[in-house]
Every structure is written in structure tokens, then in C-alpha cells.
């Protein structure tokens, strides 16, 4: 393989004794981010002060970093911009998409979508007050639910619970046959597997950068608009940074050309600095290699877990081509099992009611991680090490 | 005075040779922020990884830091939360306020409001599609424009162009007499002068933290909801972090109790760490002292500038009680004059077409700054040092 994963692994801080399998929730610290952020603080903010907006390139960084993310999802230069959070970007994409189909009233999604996307749709529908409905079907029923009443199909490519993968190209094509606008949430896709928004014909896409892209907790989101829509899309959150001439301080809004209109307020420069360091790691990475390694690791994890841990059942698709870069296992005491795993240094996470999630990121995970994690899981289950009061008491959150 | 401003000044990095008078746009670096952010990166993200959400208190930090900002604007504990940008928070406040007056169709603002707030109102009105109008009057005409057709009065307390100060208490009282909901933008108020959202009866307020609060470029915004509205206010941007039970992953949105519902997506933890360090400075500061010093400095600046610089005219109110913490001067070549001032180390900024803005922050500005700045300005004007090609060519932005 062209990608040297022993080198990429060295670029992350993984604490001694930790097997980190939760990059599907929060990627680890890219070591270079520490110096990058310090430099931004001391040399840019500290010394340039307000001049940083021009001299240090802050003002244009949402677009420049957007292009770097864009290369990882098959987006043309100038079609991705960074900012805000994924929920905000979904709101903008969904609002713009809905406005492109003014005579239709159904927003179609599925039960595997991340709940925040559904909540955002509810909020938008309530605000629009035009009688739109949010239709939520099972993931396998999306295709048959597409018809000419549907304005927008809003889906997350990779199911956050199980890693189940939608066929983005096929569903987008089917959506278009019915005149439906396709909005894709790439939260668990970007950096996890090859994505080709251009080839798939996706109309809008959005994602976060704190999972497989390792941008840090609360790192900025991205939004993509297909070039064919970019001059028609209404940003709804029409903030000054998306104005055609922000510093003219006109009293009326005029959207900037293209994707820039999806900018809203002042961009988060410190977080963009950290993200920039995180994206440097990707410069030497071939996404096809990522996918191949990810599938090797998840296949191995499933094989070993099923052999050594009969107490759990597989919640993820067995076919590697049907899943993203995570494996989910079910256990009736999944919460306590995960807590006890974490106490042993194997960090995954729990999703109610009975699911343990394990994310595999080839940038820093390898076969040794997989074998060790399964071995510890087997020990925890066989010896009921999870069955202790300290593992049953819920954490505050997550 | 109780506040020791020689001590507060030492807590900021002001480069040698720089007189920084642009804290109304971007406050300088609080020195402690560097270590605070590095600790967050290395010790929290680096070592705790996903566990930081609980163990390091990330999850609750938007509320905890919200309370700290709240103390500076007269808000009760539990009525302020951090996140996103000011434009986003204005959108949420305005949407919620508008929904509280469903039978009215006018959003009243003024020409001194920051344009992004007006743009955001336009975007909201377009989305609502109910025939709302944005009525923009002159600042002195707001009171007479209040009547029972007005749903919401949306104003910025301190005019970003001139520093002109609205009488927040009086206008809010007048608004309420007509049943109008009052939304206040405190961008140029928080940290600049005493604000009492509770005493004024403000219904909603929002602001940024990168100006007088020194949180850094793109630092998170805050939003306040008066406790009487907090259980009725609709967040519109109904993201999972504002859900009553985010980790239950229900398919339907239920707003969290109180201000928490105004959270949207995953909070920006790195930026909140920097802001936390910036807010530490305020622990030893009395806001009445800030106001007194701010008025001394701005009065002195006006007196000296008018005496030494007959080429400029005062754009700010002469009465110190009618202005915030900035002074604006007009000059027909304001852009070039400001560029030449910056080249001499006096950093203010320019707003089209003819205004130079100078912000005064007692935390780190003193009389010496004022005297030096005016002296340099006088030199630049008297000797036409601004009249050079390099100062006339516009920057990319700002």
C-alpha cells in the first residue's frame, strides 16, 4: 500500500496503555496541533491582533480548509466551506434544499439518521409553517418511499448506531428520478471511507470534523453544495460573513457567490488552526488504503469477537461492503461492559439501550489494537468483570 | 478605585511599540490563555480523549461559562449559555421572540444595528413566509416607531460605527408598554460598560466574546433569555445538545428546560478554554470602575484629538453618558490615515466610508496610550504622512 500507517500512527497522541476505539466519536490529538495552536495564539492573535484577519489568512481560512476537506469527499475546489456545527449546517442545507422544491411537502429521512438531524428538521418545519412533514422510515425502506411528494431526502450515509452503510450513489440517483433533492450527512463518512459527492450527484452534504478527521472536540463542521445549485441555494442563516461584501456594511443582504454564502458569523480561528494540523496527516494518505485497512481491521475484530466472546451479538452488517469503519456489539449489560473495558484501557462507547460501539481508524489503529481489545473484552465477559457497582452507575453524559 | 488596572494590563500580550485601540473589534491575547489551551489540548483531549466530555467538564462548560458571562451583564445564574456565533444566537433569539407575538408582523430595528443582525432578520422573515417586515428607522426614531403592530424590537445597545449608546432600560420599558418583545445585541456592551439585562427587563439578549471580553478570534457567542420566557421560547435551531435528553437519542425533539434549549451542536471546547482564561481577568474587576476609566480615557482622547487634530471631526457622541467605550473620528481619507496609523503602531480600524474607530479598554489601555495615539495621529495628519500609495491600496478585508 502507498500509505505508510506506521508513520501516520506516530502523528497522534495515544496514551500508554490505551487502545482507542472511539475515533468515530472523537478522534485523538494530532501531536502537531499543539504547536500549531500555540503559534496561532502567540504569533497570530498575540502579535498581529486584528491584522490576523488579513495577514495570517484568517478571513479566508473557512474556504481554504473547506477545499482540503473537499478533497477527501470528492468535492470540487470552491464547493465546501467550514463553520459552525453539523446541526447548523444541516439546517442550512435542509432549508436551502426545501426551498428548491417549493411545491412539495415531505422531508424523507430514516430511523438510522442521527437524531439531531431529525430534530433540526422538526425545528425547520415548525418555522416554515407550511405543513411540511418529516417522514421517517426504516433504512431499507427509503428507496421505496421516494416519490414525487418528497421534496428532500435527508440521510446519514453511515448509521451512527451500527455502522450500516447506505448506497449513496444509488439512493441519490433514485431520489433524482423522482425530482427529490438529496442531502447527505457525512459525519461518519469523512475520513472513514472514500466519498464522492460529485460522482454520486449529491445536492448538499455536511459533516463534522471531530470524528475521523481528528479536528478536536467541537471542531467546525463543513457544508457542500453541488455547483449546479450554488447560485440558487438560499443560506437562510444569512449572516454577514456570507454577504457578497461583508465590509460594505449594507443594510440589505446579498448572498456571496457560491459556497461562501453558507458562511454565517465570525469563524472559529483557533479551532481551524487545530483542524489544519489534523488535515496535514491526510496529505500522505490514500483513501482507498484507508478503506482497505479499515475493512481488514473491522473484519478481524468481528471474527475474533465472535470466536472469543459468545456473550455478545453483532449489531453491524457482517458484509464489509455494507458497513463503515465501526463495529457495534450488543450485550444486555452493554453499559457496564463498556465501563469495565474503559477501566482496562479499551475505549469505545455505549449507545442506549444495549450497544457497544468500536471505531477503527487506520491512521492510528492496527491489528495489535484489535487483538488486545478482543482479548480484554473476552476476559471482561467470561469473568463477569463488568458486574460491579462502579460500572453500573451511569456517567453524567455519553 | 477597587480595580487595579496596572495588574489587569499585565495579563495581556500587547506587543512592544503597539498602542492597541481595536479591542472593540478583537481583544488582545490574555497571556494565561496560551497555557490554558495547551493544557486542554495535551491533558484533556490528549489524555482523556472522549472521556473529557465528563471528566473535564466539557459537556457542561457552555452553561458554566455562560454563568460567568451572565454576571457581567446582570443575568441570573442559569439564564445564559455559550455557543455558535452572534449571528446564530440573534437568529435563535429573534425567531423565539417573533413566535411569542404570533399576531404581529413587524420586526423593528434601526440603522445603527450591526448589519449582520439585519441580514439574519431578512433570512428569518423569508423562511417564515408570513409577511413579516423588517422596519429600519433611525436610532432616534425607535421609540416613536413602537406600537402594537411591532412584534419585536431588535437593537444593538452600542452603535458599532460611532459608539452611540441606546437607553436600554427606557427603550425596553417603552417596548413593553406596547407589548413588544425586546431583543438586545450586546456585542459592544459586554465588558465595555455595566449592563443589567435583569433590571432593564430585556426579554432576549446575545453577544460575542471576542471584543471587550477578549475570548479570541471567533470565540463563542452567548445568549440570554429572561427567566419568564425560558420555558416558552422555541429554539428553532433545535439541535441535540438542546434536547431534554440528548443521549436518549429519541427521534423527536423535546426542548431542555430553560436556557439549555438554546444549545445546538457540539460545543467548541478549545475556544471555551481560551475564553475561560479570558474571563479570569474579570474576576478582580468592578464594572463600575471599567465604566469610569473608559469614560476618562474616551473623554481625554476626544479633548486631545480636537485640540491637536483639526483635520478630523468627531463622529461619536460628545456626552460620555451617550456613548460606549469607543470614539470614532471622521476624515475624508480615513482609510489611508488608519493604515498609516497602523504602520506607526497605533491600531484602530476603519469603517466605510470615512470613519476611524478607536476602542478603549481599561483592562489594558491607559492615559499614556491615549496621549501617544493622539500625538501620532496629529503627526500623521499635519504632515500628510497618510498620503502615500501604500496606504491607499485597500486590504483584502476589514
Image (cartoon, coloured by chain):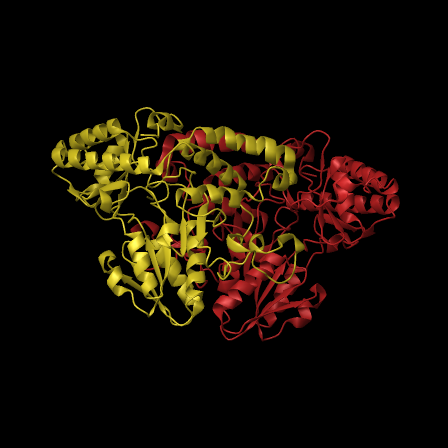
Chain colours: A red, B yellow
**In the image as oriented, which residue stretches furthest toward the top?**
B16
How far from the left and from the top, in percent, is residue B95? Answer: 44, 62
A278 or B309: nearer the viewer: B309
Quadrant location, the N terminus of chain A: top right
How far from the left and from the top, in percent, is residue A210? Answer: 59, 44
How far from the left and from the top, in percent, is residue B335? Answer: 23, 42
B153 or A102: nearer the viewer: B153
A391 or A79: nearer the viewer: A391
Question: Which image quadrant is residue A173 in?
Answer: bottom right
- Total marks in image: 0
Q: Residue at x 38, y 57 (%)?
A: B183
From this view, report whether residue B213 is shown above or below residue A190. above
From this view, report whether residue A55 is shown above or below residue A197. above
How far from the left and from the top, in percent, is residue A81? Answer: 48, 50
Q: Is residue A68 left or right of residue B137?
A: right
Q: Can residue B108 be seen by looking at this rendering?
A: no
Q: Is residue A186 left or right of residue B187?
A: right
Q: Is residue A358 left or right of residue B90?
A: right
Q: Can residue B392 be seen by looking at this rendering?
A: yes
Q: Is residue A350 left or right of residue A240?
A: right
Q: Residue at x 23, y 60 (%)?
A: B141
From this view, report whether residue B1 is shown above or below residue A21. above
Amino acid at each position: 500500500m502507498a500509505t505508510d500507517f506506521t508513520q501516520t500512527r506516530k502523528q497522534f497522541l495515544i496514551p500508554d496503555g490505551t487502545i482507542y476505539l472511539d475515533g468515530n466519536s472523537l478522534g485523538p490529538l494530532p501531536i502537531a496541533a499543539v504547536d500549531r495552536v500555540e503559534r496561532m495564539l502567540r504569533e497570530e492573535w498575540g502579535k498581529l491582533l486584528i491584522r490576523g484577519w488579513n495577514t495570517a489568512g484568517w478571513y479566508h481560512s473557512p474556504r481554504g480548509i473547506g477545499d482540503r476537506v473537499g478533497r477527501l469527499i470528492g468535492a470540487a475546489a470552491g464547493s465546501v466551506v467550514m463553520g459552525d456545527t453539523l446541526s447548523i449546517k444541516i439546517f442550512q442545507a435542509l432549508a436551502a434544499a426545501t426551498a428548491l422544491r417549493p411545491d412539495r411537502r415531505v422531508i424523507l429521512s430514516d430511523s438510522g439518521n442521527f437524531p439531531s438531524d431529525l430534530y433540526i428538521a422538526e425545528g425547520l418545519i415548525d418555522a416554515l409553517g407550511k405543513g411540511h412533514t418529516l417522514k421517517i422510515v426504516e433504512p431499507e425502506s427509503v428507496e421505496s418511499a421516494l416519490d414525487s411528494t418528497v421534496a428532500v431526502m435527508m440521510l446519514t450515509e453511515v448509521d451512527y448506531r451500527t455502522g450500516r452503510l447506505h448506497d449513496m450513489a444509488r439512493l441519490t440517483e433514485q431520489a433524482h428520478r423522482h425530482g427529490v433533492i438529496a442531502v447527505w450527512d457525512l459525519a461518519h463518512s469523512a475520513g472513514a471511507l472514500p466519498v464522492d459527492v460529485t460522482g454520486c450527484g449529491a445536492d448538499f452534504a455536511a459533516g463534522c470534523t471531530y470524528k475521523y478527521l481528528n479536528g478536536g472536540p467541537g471542531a467546525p463542521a463543513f457544508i457542500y453544495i453541488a455547483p449546479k445549485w450554488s447560485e440558487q441555494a438560499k443560506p437562510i442563516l444569512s449572516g454577514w460573513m456570507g454577504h457578497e461584501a461583508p465590509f460594505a456594511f449594507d443594510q440589505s443582504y446579498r448572498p456571496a457567490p457560491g459556497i461562501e454564502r453558507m458562511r454565517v458569523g465570525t469563524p472559529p480561528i483557533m479551532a481551524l488552526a487545530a483542524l489544519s494540523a489534523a488535515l496535514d496527516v491526510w496529505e500522505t494518505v490514500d483513501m482507498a488504503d484507508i478503506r482497505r485497512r479499515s475493512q481488514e481491521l473491522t473484519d478481524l475484530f468481528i471474527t475474533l469477537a465472535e470466536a472469543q466472546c459468545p456473550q455478545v451479538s453483532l449489531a453491524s452488517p457482517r458484509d464489509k461492503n455494507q458497513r463503515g469503519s465501526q463495529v457495534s456489539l450488543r450485550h444486555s449489560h452493554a453499559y457496564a461492559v463498556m465501563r469495565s473495558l474503559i477501566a482496562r484501557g479499551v475505549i469505545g462507547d455505549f449507545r442506549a439501550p444495549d450497544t457497544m460501539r468500536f471505531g477503527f481508524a487506520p491512521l492510528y489503529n492496527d491489528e495489535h489494537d484489535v487483538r488486545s481489545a478482543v482479548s480484554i473484552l473476552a476476559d471482561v465477559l467470561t469473568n463477569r468483570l463488568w458486574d460491579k457497582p462502579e460500572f453500573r452507575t451511569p456517567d453524567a453524559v455519553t
